[in-house]
Image (cartoon, helix red, strand yellow):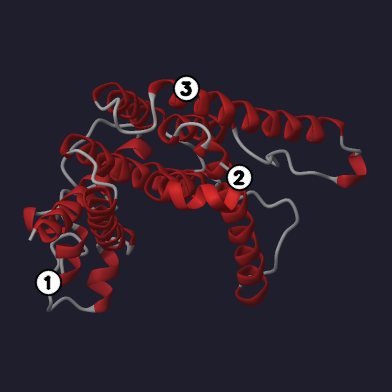
Amino acid sequence: MDILLIALLGLAAGGGVNLLADNLAAGTVPRRPRYPDGSRRPWAAWLGLSAFILGLRMPHSDSTDDANTALERGPTLGWRYPLVELALSLLMALTFAIAQGKLAQPGGKILIWLSLAALFVLIAIVDLEHRRIPRAPLLLVAALAIVAGLAYPQSPPSIVSMFAGAICAGSAFSLVYLGGRALKSLAPKRWRLPAEVAVFGRGDVHLMTVGGLIVGFPNALAAMALTIFLGGAGALLYIMATSAFGSGYKPFSTLPYGPFILAAVYIVMLWGGELQRLFYVS
């Protein structure tokens, strides 16, 4: 029953994440959910899943409308909305099950972890769609991590471990970021590097620093190693997909790295003990 309630909470949280992602992209304060043309969605369509189920993907949708009428009303709600709600529902249920069952975390820390899962999805959406790490959610993630460390000192990581992890992860990714900038500035002109080429962006460095804060040291080492592995696997899949279905891979194409960092931090947060044996000897 608890898992079902958390899953339902995840659906509602997914609707909130979609709303915040749209507002962050537009630079507006949170407001009532809207269609792509800016018109307000009816209450029954506040969730993307309900909008799809009830046929409310467009303003004033009517089952008797013909194709031309539907086209005149503008674009419909995209698949991102129900997919995010379903994904966050599953993610929060998984987080709750692992944190309560296997890790036996206190209730307050479980609530913080559920909030972190929702914020992770929000940051990932903004990075995927707009190639930037939103500052406000990132600061909230850092604040929640510190609150968890202070409120539950008996539950690892400790405050000292958390700040050591942040320094370790931030320093390592800063070196990679500065190395990428140096390569771009020193590369011969005949290489014709695009102006936007970079290994990591500054936002990725900040995100990895906060990730190190969440998992602490030495788990930050596992998070960085897993990030690089996931990023490499994602880049390989991107090359294969663009070669098979697109116009072909373009050298030095930039990919959003935030989702890989977030996935790695989430995995280490829940399964850090198992990953310790893979990435370093305790």
146 lies above or below 14: above
Question: Helix, strand, or loop for circle 3?
Answer: helix
- Neighbor class of circle 2 (other Cα within 10 Å; few <14, some 14-19, many 20+) is few
Residue 64 located left or right of residue 131: left
The residue singled out by tag 3 in the image is: 163
> Percent position (x, y) of residue 225?
60, 46
Q: State yes or no: discs 1 and 2 in contact (Cβ < 8 Å).
A: no
Question: Helix, strand, or loop for circle 1?
Answer: loop
Going from N to C along the chain, the mark reached first, 1 or 2, is 1
Query: Which of the pair 66/235 is nearer the observer?
Result: 235
> Percent position (x, y) of residue 133?
47, 36
Three-letter code for the amino acid on which mark 1 is drawn = Asp
Residue 138's mark? Answer: none
The residue singled out by tag 1 in the image is: 62
Three-letter code for the amino acid on which mark 3 is drawn = Phe
* Between marks 1 and 3 in the image, the one whose residue lies nearer the viewer: 3
> Percent position (x, y) of residue 27?
35, 32
The residue singled out by tag 2 in the image is: 280
Going from N to C along the chain, the mark reached first, 3 or 2, is 3
Residue at horizontal 70%, vertical 64%? 249
Residue at horizontal 63%, vertical 38%? 200
Which image quadrant for residue 168? top right
* Between marks 3 and 2 in the image, the one whose residue lies nearer the viewer: 2
Three-letter code for the amino acid on which mark 2 is drawn = Tyr
